[in-house]
Amino acid sequence: MRFIDLRSDTVTVPTKAMRDAMYNAEVGDDVYADDPTVIELEAYAAELVGKEAAIFVPSGTFGNQLALLTHCRRGDEVIVGDDSHIVVHEVGASAVIAGVQLRTLNSVKGELNPLEVESKIRGEDIHFPSTGLICLENAHSNGRVISLDNMEKIYAIARKHNLPVHLDGARLFNASTYLNVPVKDVTKYCDSVMFCLSKGLCAPVGSILAGSKNFVDSARKGRKLMGGGLRQAGFLAAAGLVALREMTGRLKEDHENAKYLAEELSKIPSIKVKIDDVHIDMVFFDASEIKYDHDKLVQEFYNKGIKISPSENGEFRFLTNYWVSREDINYVIDTFKNILENK
């Protein structure tokens, strides 16, 4: 049975071009730095985002935490939004791996106030931890894209105080697509950037962490410490190359499908869709007023060949992706209406 999977854009499976590339990949031992396909991916990825070097890592969380480990000393403080992925969905790894303290700031739908960021940078005092890093996220995990003006202002503050900025760019190419700018126009406002190859780009595994050559050289040792030495990783890197060369340019289609999904969902009585937050491939909506058990709703969708995630804090999140067509979306909407009509 074929399922329509709206749980995430991470559920995509490799395209035929990726499978062929993986099958035919030339590989070596990446820990010895002699896997030619990994080397090609890292060089291409670094050039794409305007950084000196890049390193292939197993996942987005791995890449973010490796960035914290590389930028910071144990006991440092990291300034980050309280609704960011690093804070909410990375299992407290910053305390375990890098040994840092997160200083969370309130965000306005993902955007941090530059003046508040500057006010939270620690001064020299024997009682204070040292501020070691500022973290931004774009596109944000709330589905919105952060303005380049906001990023530029925060980056200027970081430069003023000689602090690095790390960008969680798990959906970086979604952000550049929404902004209609080259990806380098986003990444020029950070010192390091992580972006996923497996979110919306159809690669099965992997992310990239990019930055200066010195930063990446240090990160290689941290990656080994964290268990990220993947040996013949070229089989995975081959899919990553296809993802970056062929899949980034079609993300607008996912965004348009998400807008269509949001508009159709909003026509269902008692469904409150966050229309203004549909910037990329994510649709958030509140279904609390339908008076229908949310766990049962998940099961009913599954019975009809549709996979959705349970609600979180009262909200559902549907994501479009390469394998979800406009026809699929119409089926989802019709199914939703039928479930509610027959409750």
Image: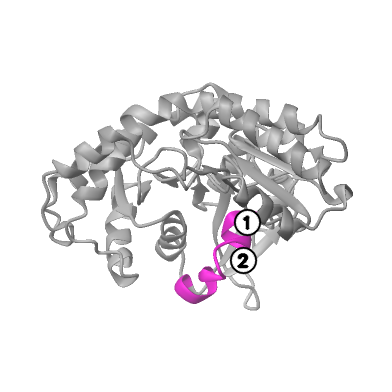
Q: Is residue 59 left or right of residue 30?
A: right
Asked if residue 93 is among those painted magenta in the image, a careful observer would answer: yes
In three-dimensional space, the C-alpha distance between marks 1 and 2, rounded to whole angstroms, equals: 7 Å
Residue at the far top in the pictured view = 180
Residue underneath mark 2: 102
Left or right: where does residue 336 sit relative to residue 52? right
Residue type at tag 1: Val
Which residue lies at the image location 35% right of the left edge and 70% below the top edge?
A: 226
Label placed on residue 80 = 1
In the displayed structure, would residue 220 be above or below residue 274?
A: below
Q: Give the residues drawn in magenta, as a range.
A: 84-98
- The one nearer the camera, 229 or 14, is 14
Amino acid identity at mark 2: Leu
* Disc on res. 104: none
| SS type, badge 2 | strand
For the residue pair 54 and 321, the one nearer the viewer reads as 321
Residue depicted at 73% across the width and 40% down the height: 336
Query: Is residue 178 shown left or right of residue 260?
Result: left
Evaluate whether residue 58 shows in this view.
yes
The answer to whether the residue labelled 1 contacts the one labelled 2, judged by CB atoms less than 8 Å apart, is: yes
- Lower position in the chain sequence, tag 1 or tag 2: 1
With 315 as the anchor, is 215 left or right in this view? Answer: left
**Percent position (x, y) of residue 180?**
54, 21
How many residues crowd mark 1 within 10 Å: few (<14), some (14–19), many (20+)? Answer: many
Dominant secondary structure (helix, strand or loop) of the stretch shown in magenta:
helix
Residue 225 placement: quadrant: bottom left
